[in-house]
Image: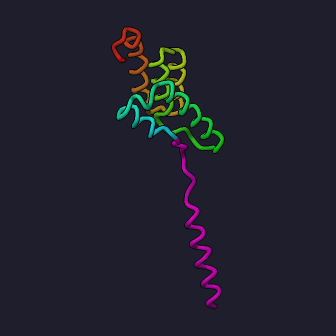
Amino acid sequence: MKTIYTLFALLLLTGCAAGPKPLYYWGNFPDQTYLMYSAPAKATASQQIEKLQADIQKAKAAQLGVPPGLYAHLGLMYLNEGNVQKSEEYFNLERQVYPESTTLINRMLGDKNKLDQGALK
């Protein structure tokens, strides 16, 4: 009888240790966002684009979602690089994947003309 209780306890603990599968693959996104504000020289737009693109590929490979805000941030980085077409692509992707971001994305798309004039740099 003692063996049955021990076996049951081990099975219960093993089941709890696995934990739920995460929803998103965060990768470098939080660190890049932090560095962008705290040490801009360490997180230029081109560096962030490279790392965030790699994170998207890793998320797909792990069958996890891309976290909220990553596509919008990537769009902003492309906009800072002057690639308006790519920025709009990622802004629209953010809006498609996360409809609750529609108001923010519409604002960002509306402000893209200001970047051309140098106001957002």
Give the magenta-colored segment's residue range: 1-27
The residue most toward the top is 117
5 above or below 85? Answer: below
Tell which of 41 and 120 is nearer to you: 41
- What is the quadrant of the N terminus in the image? bottom right
Figure label count? 0
Up the image or down, 84 lies above or below 101; here it is above
Camera-side residue of 22 and 96: 22
Q: Quadrant of residue 59?
A: top right
Dominant secondary structure of the residues highlighted in magenta in the image:
helix
Magenta highlight on residue 19: yes
In the displayed image of the protein, which residue is found farthest to the front? 41
Asked if residue 47 is among those painted magenta in the image, a careful observer would answer no
Q: Residue at x 51, y 28 (%)?
A: 47
Q: Give the answer, above or below, for where 41 lies relative to 19.
A: above
The residue that appears at 53% across and 42% down in the rendered structure is: 27
Report the side of 66 relative to 106 (left or right). right
Percent of width and height locating residue 104: 40, 26
The answer to whether one can see residue 95 in this image is no
**Residue 106 makes an appearance in the image:** yes
Q: Quadrant of the C terminus?
A: top left
Which residue shows up at 57% across the image and 31% down it? 53
Q: How is the image coloured?
A: rainbow
Q: Position of residue 38 (x, y in %)?
A: 35, 35
What is the x, y in percent for residue 102? Answer: 44, 27
The single residue placed furthest to the bottom in the displayed view is: 1
User: Up-down: is 27 above or below 49?
Assistant: below
Q: Percent from the top left, x then y, of residue 26?
A: 51, 42
